[in-house]
Image: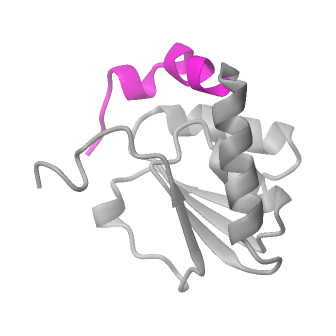
């Protein structure tokens, strides 16, 4: 299922990234939750910022699930930050994904209610 609209709009994600207190809070929480060497799943990865934070916290690998076209930008941002090999971007709905391994930590900032709401 491909979704468009607000969640695939780069300017929407730019607004979220510009919120420094919000980003610091996520960065600090992820740094406390991720033990170096763990595998992480980022649900609704959007720009991929939480995936980047997980890598910087020591995650061995991150699976970033994002069903909107913003996943293309997230992949580019990971490469530009030298983390392209550490994050696997999955351009699909979470319900349609079979991960190749079990993850230790799940991170997310679900703005949409589509996973827990309507279905």
The colour scheme of the drawn protein is one colour
Q: Main secondary structure of the magenta part?
A: helix
Give residue 8's position: percent from left, percent from top: 43, 26
Direction from residue 98 to residue 1 in the image, left or right? left
In-front residue for pair 94/26: 26
Tell me the residue at 31%/39% (across/down): 112
Q: Which residues are magenta?
A: 1-17
Count the labels in the image: 0
Q: Is residue 13 above or below residue 49?
A: above
Q: Is 4 above or below relative to 23?
A: above
Q: Residue at x 66, y 65 (%)?
A: 62
Could you tell me residue 75's position as x and y percent? 66, 42
The quarter holding residue 30 reads bottom right
Q: Position of residue 3 (x, y in %)?
A: 30, 34
Q: Is residue 3 magenta?
A: yes
Q: Would you say 13 lies left or right of 69 here?
A: right
Which residue is found at the position 58% from the left and 17% from the top?
15
Q: Quadrant of the C terminus?
A: bottom left
Dividing the picture into quadrants, the one containing residue 60 is bottom right
96 vs 28: above or below: below
- Camera-side residue of 54 and 19: 19
Question: Residue drawn at (22%, 56%), measured in percent from left and top?
Answer: 116
**Residue 79 in the image, given as x and y percentages of width and height:** 80, 43
| Residue at the extreme bottom of the image, as rendered | 102
């Amino acid at each position: 299922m491909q979704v468009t609209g607000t969640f695939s709009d780069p300017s929407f994600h730019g607004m979220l990234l510009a919120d420094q207190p919000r980003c610091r809070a996520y960065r600090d929480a992820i740094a406390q939750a991720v033990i170096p060497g763990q595998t992480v799943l980022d649900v609704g990865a959007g720009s991929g910022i939480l995936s980047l934070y997980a890598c910087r916290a020591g995650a061995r690998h991150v699976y970033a699930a994002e069903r909107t076209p913003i996943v293309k930008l997230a992949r580019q941002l990971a490469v530009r930050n030298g983390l392209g090999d550490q994050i696997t971007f999955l351009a699909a709905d979470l319900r349609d994904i079979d991960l190749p391994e079990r993850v230790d930590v799940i991170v997310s900032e679900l703005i949409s209610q589509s996973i827990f709401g309507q279905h």
